[in-house]
Image (cartoon, rainbow, N blue to C red):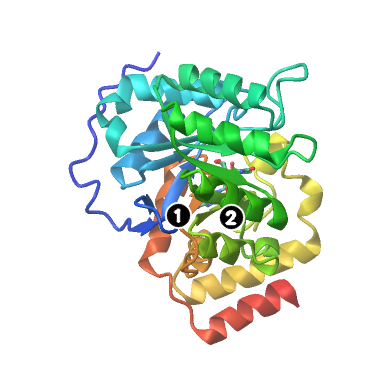
Amino acid sequence: MINSVYKASDSRYESIMKYRRCGSSGILLPEISLGLWHNFGDVDTLSNSFSMAHYAFDQGITHFDLANNYGPSFGSAEETFGTIMKKSFAPYRDELFISTKAGHDMWNGPYGTWGSRKHLIASLNQSLKRMNIEYVDIFYSHRFDPNTPLEETLQTLVDIVKQGKALYIGISKYPTEAAKFAYNYLSERDVPCLLYQGRYNIFDRDLEERNIIKQAYDNGSGFIAFSPLAQGLLTDRYLNGIPADSRISRGGFLKKETLTDDVLLKIQNLNKIAHDRGQTLAEMALAWILKDKYVSSVIIGASSVRQLSDNINALHNTQFSKEELEKINCICLG
Ligand code: NDP
């Protein structure tokens, strides 16, 4: 049982955190946001989840990113966040920008996944209860559903905003054409898309190559990057083997097979560049994303306050010389 007597730091807006405007909206997001995909589930240590949330907010991180099925188990990250809301963050609700999503597998049967009106509305209602909040700041369609008319998914997002259950809406992992359709459909109904959420990091530049990041900007939407550290590969975590408490060891989406000799060599070489810049590899990896003016924020994951603190230090230097960028490209792209 957590008996939180949390009081937010009085200097929370005087740290190095900066805030960027999301596309052409009125919303400012912290350059670093905190994601609760891992380390906030019912398998994790509740006191650590509390410590990370408190530390994040004390450092000016106002944006917390969730989804219906984050955990494990499904729903448990939202429940943890709901407990944090109740015990710590309730007085600060208007200082927080909270997201959730629906569209990936959540419950059994035909209405527990994808992009139908039935799934999205039922899922959001569940999320609000778990998180002990009356509305989310942004609700996302978590993935494009090729079998549901896109108009149905998008109209549901519009209706959710009109019902007051979300202030803004966003899309995640949509292919280019579907994203284009979404931007137009939503803005024509006066509920413009606030954010496109997609994977972007030094190793994975697919969205840049497919022009998705610039497309968001051109449509007045922000872009928020997930897995900016490639789930931990772009840190010092795996430089000397695979730690027992690491994401790879715990099993899940980051597989041991991903850490090939070739990838390890790239990590080692990137680490040398980071060292020459006076940064850790994690700091450099985040700075590399934030150098892009089209990026509104990066959503980091963390398993400790120490990692969070390291990551926030990235903001001390987000400038790169041409030579540094060339060296990084040479390592990653060959
Ligand atoms: P990251 O790429 O930031 O990876 C986080 C992991 O990297 C941590 O759990 C930790 O691993 C390791 N790490 C973080 N900081 C450090 C550090 N300073 N030093 C050493 N290791 C470090 O992000 P995630 O993959 O966790 O994704 C972030 C968020 O993005 C999610 O929580 C979610 O909100 C969102 N997301 C959205 C998706 C979507 O479909 N829209 C998909 C995936 C994520 P370890 O646990 O081993 O310590």
Asked if one can make out residue 105 in the rendered structure from this viewpoint, the answer is: yes
Which one is in front, 54 or 142? Answer: 142
The crowding category of the residue bearing disc 2, from other C-alpha atoms within 10 Å (few below 14, some 14 to 19, many at least 20), is: many
Residue 122 at x, y percent in the picture = 59, 19
Quadrant of the rendered image containing residue 236: bottom right
Vertical comparison of 257 with 318: above or below: above
Instruction: Give the labeled residue for mark 2.
Output: 229
Please indicate whether residue 228 sits to the left or right of residue 59 in the image: right
x 66%, y 39%: residue? 151
Residue placed furthest toward the top: 1
Vertical comparison of 72 with 192: above or below: above
Quadrant of the rendering where the C terminus is positioned:
bottom right
Residue type (three-letter) at the residue carrying disc 1: Asn
The crowding category of the residue bearing disc 1, from other C-alpha atoms within 10 Å (few below 14, some 14 to 19, many at least 20), is: many
Helix, strand or loop at disc 1? Answer: helix
- Is ligand 1 within 8 Å of the beta carbon of the residue shown at mark 2? yes
Which one is in front, 63 or 251? Answer: 63
Residue 180 at x, y percent in the picture = 64, 56
Vertical comparison of 185 with 296: above or below: above
Q: Identify the mark at residue 311; answer none if there is no mark.
A: 1
User: Counting residues from the N terminus, which is met first, the one under dot 1 or under dot 2?
Assistant: 2
Please indicate whether residue 229 sits to the left or right of residue 258 in the image: left
Q: CA distance from mark 1 to mark 2?
A: 10 Å
Asked if one can make out residue 175 in the rendered structure from this viewpoint, the answer is: no
- Is ligand 1 within 8 Å of the beta carbon of the residue shown at mark 1? yes
Q: Identify the mark at residue 232; answer none if there is no mark.
A: none
